Image (spheres, rainbow, N blue to C red):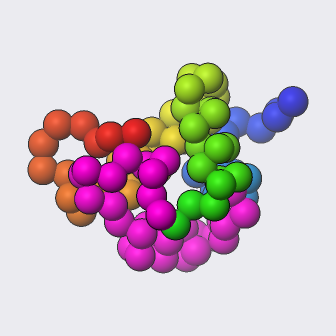
Amino acid sequence: MFDQQPTLELFFEQLGLDASEQGIEKFLETHQLTMDIPLHEAAFWSKSQRDFIISHWKKDDEWAMVVDILNELLHKEHKLSGSCKI
């Protein structure tokens, strides 16, 4: 069982990504999604990363809030109105 409070940094670690502040900022800058692309359908995820995102979002567990935050951050440049797809 996971004992730490989920954070964006820990989520990036779980996905096998650079979890440093600079690494996260660079990822967010270079992986922006248009509103018609749901987070889990982004082409840059591996199958295991996609499965991790989907499973925690569907479970609506402690990681679901971090998935929602990441979703918002990856759609921020294209968010005009309404909510982002996941």
Residue found 48% across the figure and 76% down from its top: 26
- Drawn side of residue 74 relative to residue 27, left or right: left
Q: Is residue 7 visible?
A: no
- Drawn side of residue 77 relative to residue 7, left or right: left
Between residue 25 and residue 53, name the one nearer to us: 53
Q: Which residues are magenta?
A: 15-43
Residue 70 belongs to magenta span: no
Residue 30 picture location, percent across and down: 41, 76
Is 33 rendered above or below residue 63? below
Q: Which quarter of the image is occupied by the C terminus?
A: top left
Residue 4 picture location, percent across and down: 77, 38
Q: Which quarter of the image is occupied by the N terminus?
A: top right
Residue 23 picture location, percent across and down: 58, 74
Is 57 rendered above or below residue 74? above
Residue 23 belongs to magenta span: yes
Q: Quarter-wise, where is residue 45 in the image? A: bottom right
